[in-house]
Image (cartoon, grey):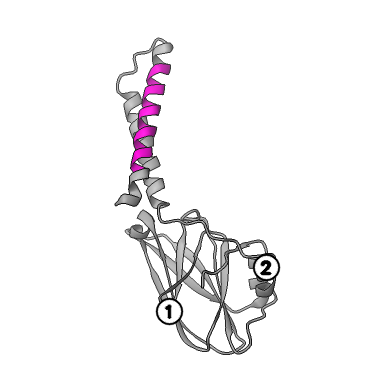
């Protein structure tokens, strides 16, 4: 609950400032403000608090170096390991950070459009992706398994699918290296934390 306190405080401040400002503006124009400024201020305050609460779990990720990004774009996995690339695209929830975990270990948080890449040992692995903050309660997390072979490039594209009650995070495996290169080149690479 404590991570939502700043969102609530800012929401109240927005509601107060907008209500008072709009009320003074109407009075200076010689119009009786009535309840309109309070409704407008209240709406904008609640809207501001809601957006900030959705972003409460978002962290600032460290951008990878140009050399790290180029190594990924050249598809050079470490000897004896596979390279896992996960990128996020789409407009829905693009400012909210999506946590990426591999085998229950935090790797990075991705906004849209961003990507990250890590080396993984050969064998079976699991990717899980979920939002933090209030956005996490509005979206179903996802879990996807894959098997890595030495020297293999494995890429997943994460997007959002709107639902009636909850949104879903979709993971799609991308096989074409040409498509992958075109998509990743303009994106910012987030350095993995592992």
Give the residue drawn at x 48%, y 72%: 171
Q: The magenta stretch spans which residues?
A: 7-25
Q: Left of 154 or right of it: where is 124?
A: left
* Up-down relation of residue 145 to residue 5 (above or below): below
Give the residue drawn at x 56%, y 69%: 116
Residue 136 image offset from top left, x and y in percent:
36, 60
Check disc 1 and report its element: helix, strand or loop. loop
Determine the image quadrant of residue 127. bottom left
Check disc 2 and report its element: helix, strand or loop. helix
In the picture of the structure, the residue carrying the numbered disc 1 is 103
Residue nearest the viewer, comparing 134 with 33: 134
Residue 10 image offset from top left, x and y in percent:
38, 38
In the picture of the structure, the residue carrying the numbered disc 2 is 182
Residue 183 image offset from top left, x and y in percent:
64, 66
* Up-down relation of residue 174 to residue 12 (above or below): below
Q: Left of 102 or right of it: where is 11?
A: left
Residue 8 painted magenta? yes
Please name the predominant secondary structure of the magenta segment in the image.
helix
For the residue carrying disc 2, how many other residues have a C-alpha within 10 Å: few (<14), some (14-19), or many (20+)? Answer: few
Q: Is residue 179 visible?
A: no
Give the residue drawn at x 63%, y 82%: 77
Q: Is residue 170 visible?
A: yes
Residue 104 image offset from top left, x and y in percent:
40, 76
């Amino acid at each position: 609950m404590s991570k939502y306190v700043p969102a609530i405080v800012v929401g109240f401040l927005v509601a107060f400032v907008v209500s008072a400002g709009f009320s003074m503006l109407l009075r200076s124009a010689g119009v009786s403000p009535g309840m309109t400024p309070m409704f407008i201020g209240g709406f904008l305050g609640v809207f501001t608090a809601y957006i900030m609460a959705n972003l409460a779990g978002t962290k600032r990720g460290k951008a990878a170096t140009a050399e790290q990004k180029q190594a990924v774009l050249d598809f050079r996995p470490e000897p004896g390991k596979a390279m896992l690339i996960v990128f996020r695209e789409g407009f829905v929830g693009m400012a909210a950070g999506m946590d990426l975990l591999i085998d229950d270990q935090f790797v990075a948080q991705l906004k849209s459009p961003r990507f990250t890449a890590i080396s993984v040992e050969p064998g079976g692995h699991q990717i899980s992706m979920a939002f933090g903050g209030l956005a996490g309660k509005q979206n179903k997390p996802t879990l996807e398994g894959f098997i890595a072979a030495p020297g293999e490039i494995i890429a997943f594209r994460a997007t959002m699918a709107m639902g009636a009650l909850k949104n879903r995070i979709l993971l799609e495996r991308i096989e074409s290296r040409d498509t992958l290169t075109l998509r990743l080149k303009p994106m910012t690479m987030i350095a993995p934390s592992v």
